Amino acid sequence: MLTELLASPWALVIMSALVLGDAFFVVIPGEVAVTALGALASTTGTPPLWSVIVCAGVAAMFGDTACYLIGRTVGTERWRWMRTPRVHQALDWARRRLDTGTATVLFTARFVPFARLAINLVAGAARIRAPRYLPLVAIAALGWAAYQASIGALVAVLVPGGPLVAVIVSIVAAIALGVGIDLITRRLRR
């Protein structure tokens, strides 16, 4: 039954909604959904891997662009949660990084949840021109989607046991990868 649900067109819609929501609330498992559907695409062929990548990339681009627009219209000081020490520190970090290289920062931040949110808000607040920002964020989002879906597809090829096992193992792999990235970024900040 789970395989049938994941193979339906609703799976792409649900995955896209999770990825879009992940742009604002980092606890939403957008990466996990993309990785799981990548595994399913590899084992069953449905949905096609290219559609997982395109839908996830478009949803990620829309989410990042929405954060950019919030930063552009609201700024980074308006709401109380934006003035907390942790958020303020992340926004200051994002400002410093955007000054040194917009493309590098957008591509790197796409893979780090809190950094992604901070960078996109600050990019909008800093008034980085949309013709410069949008192509960079689109390429970063599609690259991220291809990477996440490919991890799921690779796990499905390497782990025997059918689609359900591949989805479970790819979810565990995505979570482990996320935890690993978080640990590395914490160490680099120190």
Image (cartoon, rainbow, N blue to C red):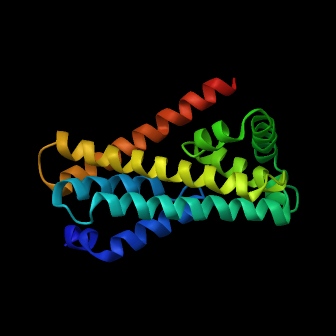
Q: Quadrant of residue 48?
A: bottom left
* Residue lying at 18% horizontally and 44% vertically, measured from the top left: 157
On-image quarter of the C terminus: top right
Task: Looking at the picture, tell me which residue is in the foreground, 101 or 33.
Answer: 101
Q: Count of labels shown?
A: 0
On-image quarter of the N terminus: bottom left
Residue 125 appears left or right of 17: right
Q: Where is residue 125 in the image (x, y as percent from the top left)?
A: 83, 55
Q: Position of residue 18 (x, y in %)?
A: 48, 65
Q: Where is residue 142 in the image (x, y as percent from the top left)?
A: 48, 53
In the figure, 75 relative to 187: above or below?
below
* Residue lying at 80% horizontally and 36% vertically, measured from the top left: 99
Task: Looking at the picture, tell me which residue is in the foreground, 28 or 60.
Answer: 60
In the figure, 186 relative to 107: above or below?
above
Task: Looking at the picture, tell me which residue is in the foreground, 49 or 88.
Answer: 49
* Residue lying at 26% horizontally and 52% vertically, measured from the top left: 39
* Residue lying at 34% horizontally and 41% vertically, measured from the top left: 173
Q: Quadrant of residue 154?
A: top left
Q: In which quarter of the image is residue 131?
A: bottom right
Residue 162 appears left or right of 134: left
Q: Position of residue 100 (x, y in %)?
A: 77, 32
Task: Looking at the picture, tell me which residue is in the foreground, 14 or 154.
Answer: 154
Outermost residue on the front side: it is 131
Outermost residue on the right side: it is 77
